[in-house]
Image (cartoon, helix red, strand yellow):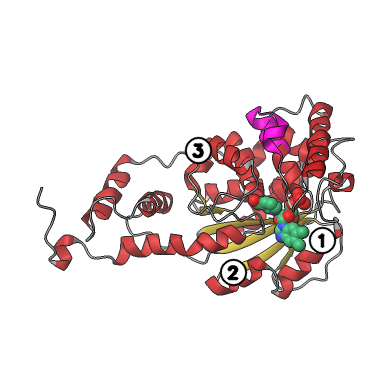
Amino acid sequence: MTDLIPHIPSLHDDALAQRLQARIDSKTKPLGSLGQLEALMQRLGLILGSETPLLKQPQLMVFAGDHGLAARGVSAFPPDVTWQMVENFLAGGAAVSVLARQHGLALTVVDAGVRHDFAPRPGLIQAKVAPGTADALEQPAMTADQCATALGAGRELLATQPGNVLILGEMGIGNTSSAALLLARLADLPIADCVGRGTGLDNAQLARKTEILGQVLARHPQARSPLEALQAFGGFEIAMMVGAVLQAALERRVILVDGFITSSAILVAARLQPAVLERCVFAHRSNEQAHRLMLEQLQAQPLLDLGLRLGEGSGAALAWPLLESACRILVEMASFASAGVSERQS
Ligand SMILES: Cc1cc2ncn([C@H]3O[C@H](COP(=O)(O)O)[C@@H](O)[C@H]3O)c2cc1C
Ligand SMILES: O=C(O)c1cccnc1
């Protein structure tokens, strides 16, 4: 399994960071006045290794999988919604489909483990490990082999994608449960702090979900390493995202992270290879309550806070133009010298 995990070196480069800062500060604006966008310019410049970074052929990849645990009623929606939404993505009707079209993002849906047979068509990658994970209350969601297969497939398929940006999205009824379990175990937090309403549970349903997830954690006391936790709690879409993220990090691509579930894949990847985080841009803070804690664990400053709680990659697609703006400003904006604008007096 460990040969599936590449070493991700740190991007630390003081000289480039200083050149980037000098370039940002030379622009025709008061120092620091572009706020968080300036930190984004630094980050994109360091990831792409340039003072004038160019974002090329961004790939929005929606990883989909079903969850055995969903049969326990941990979601407000039935498991069939997973495959039905995959059809909706491919037909161009989902929120993320609309946003991808608006921003010219290539949208690919990856069947990592949906309990449904899809007809092959453009925009769909068939990489099904199995038709859904096992019920984590009874056994690990995946076998060690399945977990390794998902990681390897995620790495391989990312390696065949063009461009230098990976935009993460996901679909899988029940997957806020997997994300909550991963957060609870890997950050050693109480499950009550990690659980959320997902697709819209009421108070009684939330209490039931918390109870079930507490039992799942108790069922797998030995699953403490990132890979053991991933195997125990699932799902296939999260495991495949971990593989894709590791490969993207290795190839020095920008990784644009969406909400709570895509962040859980980053949490696993970062616990395996911490320098993954240097390649990540966090699009937004989700309304799934535990995303705040998740972002703290990842020491992440999200760009947006719009009260979204959808997933699919929708928040990442909405944040995409900010990345484009950051690069354009670095490349196109005039400096005090080039524009002949007077500098600050004191
Ligand atoms: C129609 C519909 C579209 C969605 N698109 C994303 N999700 C989101 O909801 C699911 C996670 O919430 P839970 O853990 O409560 O099931 C994931 O599939 C996620 O992407 C959706 C959910 C629904 C119902
Ligand atoms: O933040 C997310 O990714 C999220 C939150 C609720 C439901 N589905 C996804």
Residue under circle 2? 99
Q: Distance between the residues labelled 3 and 2?
A: 27 Å
Q: Distance between the residues labelled 3 and 1?
A: 33 Å
Q: Is mark 3 within 8 Å of ligand 2?
A: no
Amino acid on which disc 1 is placed: Val
The residue positioned 73% from the left and 49% from the top of the image is 198
Comparing 132 with 160, the one in front is 132
Q: Position of residue 175 (x, y in %)?
A: 75, 48
Residue under circle 1? 81
Q: Position of residue 192 (x, y in %)?
A: 72, 33
Note whether 131 is above or below 211 in the view shown. Answer: below
Residue under circle 3? 299
The residue positioned 82% from the left and 45% from the top of the image is 74
Note whether 241 is above or below 325 in the view shown. Answer: above
The residue positioned 70% from the left and 47% from the top of the image is 238
Q: Is mark 2 on a helix, strand or loop?
A: helix
Q: How crowded is mark 2: few (under 14 residues within 10 Å), some or many (20 or more)?
A: many
Residue 170 visible to the viewer: yes
> Is 191 inside the magenta-drawn segment?
yes
Amino acid on which disc 2 is placed: Leu
The residue positioned 55% from the left and 56% from the top of the image is 306
Q: Residues within 10 Å of mark 1 (few under 14, many from 20)?
A: some
Residue extending farthest to the front is 203
Q: Where is residue 138 in the image (x, y as percent from the top left)?
A: 90, 35
Q: Distance between the residues labelled 1 and 2?
A: 20 Å
Comparing 157 with 93, the one in front is 93
